[in-house]
Image: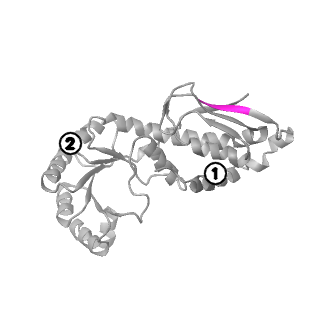
Amino acid sequence: MKLSKEEIRKKVRETLIEDGADMDITSSSLEIGDDRARAYILAKESGVICGLEIVKEVFYSLCSDADIKILKKDGDKVFTGDKVMLIEASQKALLSGERTALNFLSHLSGIASKTRIFVDKIAQYPKSGIYDTRKTLPGLRAFEKYAVRCGGGKNHRFNLADQVLIKENHLKAANLSVKEAVLKARKKNPASIIEVETENYSEFIEALEGGADIVMLDNFKEEDMVKACHFAHDNYPSVKVEISGGVSLDGLEKIAAAGADRISVGRMTNSAPALDFTFLMK
């Protein structure tokens, strides 16, 4: 699912206002105005690109008659030196929109690139999916989750209203066991997916007995993780097992080989390095 045009327009407007794009005193001081110029955006390193439609909207917002040619599509692999977009617009629009455009492109492409690394690592285990989390920058969740999809990953719940996910602190606050919490959540929200985080094998069994749809294994030891995956698949085939907590690239294949249905990775969004691009005017 792509980002809606309205989502893009709204966020672009916010960021251009934040950057003072219509009050660029440097361009004004140098009397740089509406004369036409060309620019292109170039990849300075290899990765997976994401955010091209957002970049296009940046320059259309500043110059309604801009002529923009997108040379790649979101989700494409790009290599150092690749041209990804050509833009013809007023000089003022090009200079005022450059940083906002590159900020979006670099950040989202970094997430897509990081995601693709995780996805490719377990390509031989098609039953296991790489999922994101809610560890996103405030105000950018829809965009960052879109970047995960462009990288080949899958989206976990978008927000707290999407599904029930019972965690340790919920259990403490409600003073309930895992099984009791699942049963209560099911009674209150019969149509919702019910997921519960478990911290040991006995809690895992409670979650299954309570009727959870997804059971998250948080920081399980490898032997317990393997045991739990096999038990669930043999005895509760409709239940999905999700692995979370400290998931690293080095340990990813072991998790997939154990039979995990879902592997949630917060670092795809909360610590992905930006992918470097440059903006050059002709």
Q: Which of 271 and 161 is in front in this view?
A: 161
Crowding near pointer 1: few (<14 within 10 Å), some, many (20+)?
many
Q: In which quarter of the image is residue 182?
A: bottom left
SS at mark 1 in the image: helix
Q: Which residue in the protein does label 2 denote?
A: 258
Picture quadrant where residue 99 is located:
top right
Q: In this view, does 240 lie to the left or right of 268?
A: left
Disc 1 residue type?
A: Val
Q: What stretch is highlighted in magenta?
A: 38-42
Name the foreground residue: 168 vs 41. 41
Residue that appears at 24% across and 54% down: 240
Establish if 255 lies above or below 202: above
Badge 2 amino acid: Ala
Please name the residue that numbered disc 1 is placed on: 12
Q: Is disc 2 placed on a helix, strand or loop?
A: helix
Magenta stretch containing residue 116, yes or no? Answer: no
- Which quadrant does the C terminus fall into? top right
Looking at the image, do the residues carrying marks 1 and 2 touch, with CB atoms under 8 Å apart? Answer: no
Q: Can residue 272 be seen in this view?
A: no
